[in-house]
Amino acid sequence: MSRSDKLLESIRNNPRDVRFSDALKVATSYFGSPRIDGSHHVFTVPGGQRLNLQPGNAGKAKGYQVEQLLVVIDSLAK
């Protein structure tokens, strides 16, 4: 199991308590490098959608954005 797979499992277990750097690592492993505009890290995902990640408080990722990341990753598996 690769490091990004382990990070993805830990994110699935607790999506509301994820370090921003971990969310970025997982998103980058699936979608490549983001376009960065200030604090916004924007990923282009298959189908032309965009996925935005930005840091929340105390170095954590915003929970709703992590949940969106999981939905997009799950949709790729189908």
Image (cartoon, rainbow, N blue to C red):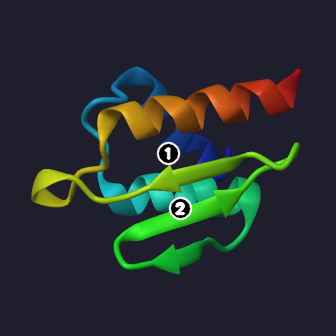
User: Which quarter of the rendered picture does the C terminus lie within?
Assistant: top right
Residue at x-position 25% and y-position 36% = 17
The label on residue 25 is 2
| Left or right of residue 26: residue 59 | left
Q: Residue furthest left?
A: 58
- Residue 23 spot, x, y in % from top left: 45, 52
- Residue 38 spot, x, y in % from top left: 37, 79
Q: Can residue 65 be seen? A: yes
Most foreground residue, 68 or 26: 68
Residue at x-position 28% and y-position 30% = 16
Q: In the structure shown, which secondary structural element does the residue marked by tag 1 occupy?
A: helix
Residue at x-position 53% and y-position 32% = 68
- Residue 40 spot, x, y in % from top left: 42, 66
Task: Determine crowd level at label 2: few under 14, some 14-19, many 20+ residues with C-alpha closer than 10 A.
Answer: some
- Residue 63 spot, x, y in % from top left: 32, 34
| Left or right of residue 24: residue 78 | right
Which of the two discs, 1 and 2, sits closer to the camera? 2
Quadrant of the image occupied by residue 15: top left
Amino acid, disc 2? Lys
- The numbered mark, 1 or 2, whose residue comes first in the sequence reads 1
Q: Are marks 1 and 2 in contact (CB under 8 Å)?
A: yes
The label on residue 7 is 1
Q: In the structure shown, which secondary structural element does the residue marked by tag 2 occupy?
A: helix
User: Which quarter of the rendered picture does the N terminus lie within?
Assistant: top right
Residue at x-position 83% and y-position 33% = 76
The label on residue 54 is none
Q: Can residue 3 be seen? A: no
